[in-house]
Amino acid sequence: MPTRPLRIRLRPARVPPTRLRPARVLPCLLALAALTAALALTVTGGGTLGHRAPLYAWYAVDAALYALALLALRRVGGRQVVPLVLAGSVAVAAVGLLAPPRTSDDAYRYVWDGRVQAAGTSPYAHTPDDPALARLRTPDLWPTGGACDGWDERRTAAGDCTRINRPAVHTIYPPVAEAWFLALHPFGGGVRGMQAAGALLAVATTGALLVIGRGGRRAALWGWCPGVTVWSANDAHVDTLGALLLVVGLGYAARRKATWAGALLGAAVAVKLIPALALPGALARRRPRENALLLGASLGAFALAYLPYLAASGTGVLGYLPGYLKEEGYEQGHLDRFGLLALLLPDALLPWAAGAVLAAVALWVLRRGDPARPWDGALFVTGTALLLAAPAYPWYGLLVVALVGLTGRGEWLAVPAAGQYLYLTGGVEAQQAAYGAALACVAVGTLVRGRATAVLSGAPAPAASPAGPGCAAPRGTSSHG
């Protein structure tokens, strides 16, 4: 008698879905709503660069609610984290669109550069007040009939009123930034379009952080940061594009995709030169062939971006960069930067000392960085460079905020906060106080983090590495993370 074959059906085990726990989610939602409301009030009525006094209080409130929302997020578990972080990022970026730029007029220059390129002219060829471009002037950038006394208005040498900063000098922005301005021109060509694009870039960066960080809460350190509302969305700084390219490039570096990593990092440098500081983290402890590919792709992308503009403008592609460095006080004999080093050294030694410290930090990262976590070394070098240079523009710190979103090392947020304080107050004393406090925060955070890691691992607490938990320890010692 024939027998039937025995059939065994294997069914996957049922995994119970993560239960929604309102008791944990609701406090985070309330904190996030309070943060969004405070940011909305900051943008719509919290002062401007011409009336700064209200900004101090509003920025303090925003920072406190940001910290509260992050603390509440720690209690949210499972599948609720990613949608909550992403929704909060959308809200934080969107409120930056409620008003025109309040604390920076750079976006007007972006609009002008895009308009000039759309008219078939190199942005490096003429200054905005050049009569040859008078046909491109419109009331949104060149107001007429008013007193021209707004915080974002000034007179040209010919007496015309404009919202474009430094109208008598050539543009300073590298070619990928200029290409971005041109790409946005067909979508309205105005400052509100620049703001919308900045908000989209900010949310896209949050998404990249969630993917590269595998859905971690750390992405909220960027996505919910009040600086994203102010610097990325409301003021529409192009640094956000550099931050997005940097994050994705480092993600490819962690996966050992050297060509893609190098191309993206080269493009980030061609947005704003500052992302070059992340290269030591991407190159740390890799095979020579990988480093050659990464460096070659990076240099190739950077050079390729410059070619069309170089053909049109020659050496004019340098724009106002030399003049800008002189204006900002980095010129020998006229130094009002490197504030922390100035407490210890004479002016003549400041650039050399800053270069030596930065070179030592970069070498440390190259020799001891973790190739699986290139963002740790990138944060150490970038943050150290900003501590040394002590710039007055807080949006330079957007790169730091993005890298904090990968590393989770929130103490480094003190660096862009120092830039924000200096931007509002000015002066050497404020510079040294702000960046001195930021350095103390970073040092204490690194020490506490190193000791906490040692306690959890059951090992004696090692001396805290200045590179933080992302750098590999020497052989025979404990790693910081």
Image (spheres, helix red, strand yellow):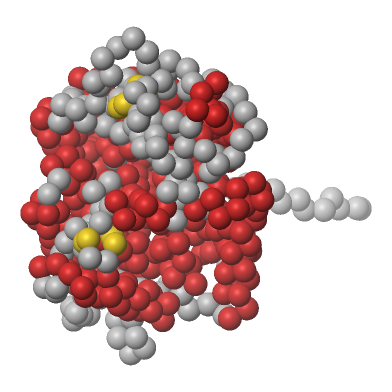
Q: Is residue 112 above or below residue 341?
A: above
- Tell which residue pokes out farthest to the top in this image: 145
Q: In front here: 78 or 250?
A: 250
- Indicate the quadrant containing the C terminus: top left, top right, bottom left or bottom right: bottom left
Task: Kindly tell me whether residue 96 is visible in this rendering.
Answer: no
- Tell which residue pokes out farthest to the right in this image: 1
Q: Is residue 362 above or below residue 240?
A: below
Residue at left offset 61%, top offset 59%: 303
Task: Kindly tell me whether residue 157 is visible in this rendering.
Answer: yes
Residue at left offset 12%, top offset 54%: 428
Point out residue 221 in the picture as x, y percentages from the top left corner. Answer: 31, 46
Q: In front here: 11 or 432?
A: 432
Give the left or right position of residue 243, taking residue 117 as reference: left
Marks counted in the figure total: 0
Q: Is residue 287 above or below residue 423?
A: below
Give the left or right position of residue 306, taking residue 74 as reference: right
Point out residue 141 in the picture as x, y percentages from the top left corner. Answer: 42, 22
Residue at left offset 14%, top offset 73%: 346
Q: In front here: 189 or 232?
A: 189
Point out residue 5 in the picture as x, y percentages from the top left corner. Answer: 82, 53
Give the left or right position of residue 309, taking residue 32 as reference: right
Residue at left offset 28%, top offset 19%: 148
Point out residue 418 in the picture as x, y percentages from the top left corner. Answer: 19, 50
